[in-house]
Image (cartoon, rainbow, N blue to C red):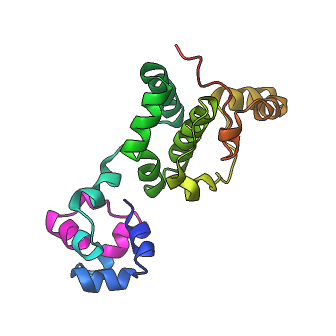
């Protein structure tokens, strides 16, 4: 989880975190600004910050250690997972793992919103109620429309916005609500 997010949630300044944790203010600033990766800090420093923020050591380090996949690979993985598990098992596993919230807290907004859109879409087509615990995230939207790589490339090379416009009009409602253009989640090889 991002330290800046934790600070905001706790209404705590970087200076206050430094005082409470005993970690030098410059170190806290460097970590918060991304100049220093927390996974490269000493265990003692991470422990002090985790204790001051009342989170586990693992929670604090997890977001800096995880490698973010290319978004097209992420989408493909999710679609294949739906195909492999089936709709109900996918919904259940996703909700139980709370990946939607974890991605959102890590500020991986496209991944979080894509996963939420997928769950909401599968709930709709299977006449299931949507998960209420994500109402706050459900209102979120990406600042810029996220098109599939193929559509983006086609529009760029043809210098024509027609393909983007067409893809938006054909997009699944649960995805376009978050500014993600997605029209086919079932036809994966």
Query: In the picture shown, does residue 35 fall above or below 94?
Result: below
Q: Is residue 33 magenta?
A: yes
Left or right: where 188 falls relative to 49: right
- Look at 42% across and 36% down and name the residue there: 92
Instruction: Name the spot of residue 159 as percent of width and height, x first.
Output: 82, 31
- Quadrant of the image containing the N terminus: bottom left
Left or right: where 62 falls relative to 151: left
Query: In the picture shown, does residue 53 fall above or below 176?
Result: below
The part of the chain drawn in magenta is 28-49
Query: In the picture shown, does residue 25 fall above or below 130?
Result: below
User: From where the camera sits, is residue 42 visible?
Assistant: yes
Dominant secondary structure of the residues highlighted in magenta in the image: helix
| The residue positioned farthest toward the left in the image shown | 44
- Look at 23% across and 62% down and name the residue there: 56
Q: Quadrant of residue 150?
A: top right
Instruction: Name the spot of residue 174 as percent of width and height, x first.
Output: 66, 40
Q: How many marks?
A: 0
- Look at 40% across and 74% down and name the residue there: 7
Q: Quick one: 35 or 114, which is closer to the camera? A: 114
Instruction: Name the spot of residue 26 as percent of width and height, x first.
Output: 32, 78
Instruction: Name the spot of residue 19 as percent of width and height, x first.
Output: 27, 86
Q: Quadrant of residue 170?
A: top right
């Amino acid at each position: 989880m991002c330290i800046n997010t934790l600070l905001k949630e706790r209404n705590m300044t970087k200076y206050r975190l430094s005082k409470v944790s005993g970690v030098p203010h410059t170190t806290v600033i460097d970590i918060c600004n991304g100049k220093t990766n927390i996974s490269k800090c000493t265990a003692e420093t991470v422990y002090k910050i985790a204790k001051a923020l009342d989170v586990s050591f693992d929670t604090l380090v997890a977001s800096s250690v995880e490698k973010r996949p290319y978004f097209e690979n992420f989408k493909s993985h999710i679609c294949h997972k739906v195909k492999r598990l089936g709709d109900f098992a996918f919904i259940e596993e996703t909700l139980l793992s709370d990946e939607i919230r974890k991605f959102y807290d890590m500020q991986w907004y496209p991944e979080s919103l894509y996963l939420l859109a997928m769950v909401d879409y599968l709930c709709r087509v299977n006449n299931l109620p949507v998960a209420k615990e994500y109402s706050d995230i459900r209102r979120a939207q990406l600042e810029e429309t996220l098109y599939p790589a193929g559509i983006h490339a086609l529009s760029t090379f043809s210098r024509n916005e027609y393909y983007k416009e067409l893809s938006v009009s054909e997009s699944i409602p649960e995805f376009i609500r978050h500014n993600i253009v997605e029209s086919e989640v079932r036809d994966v090889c």
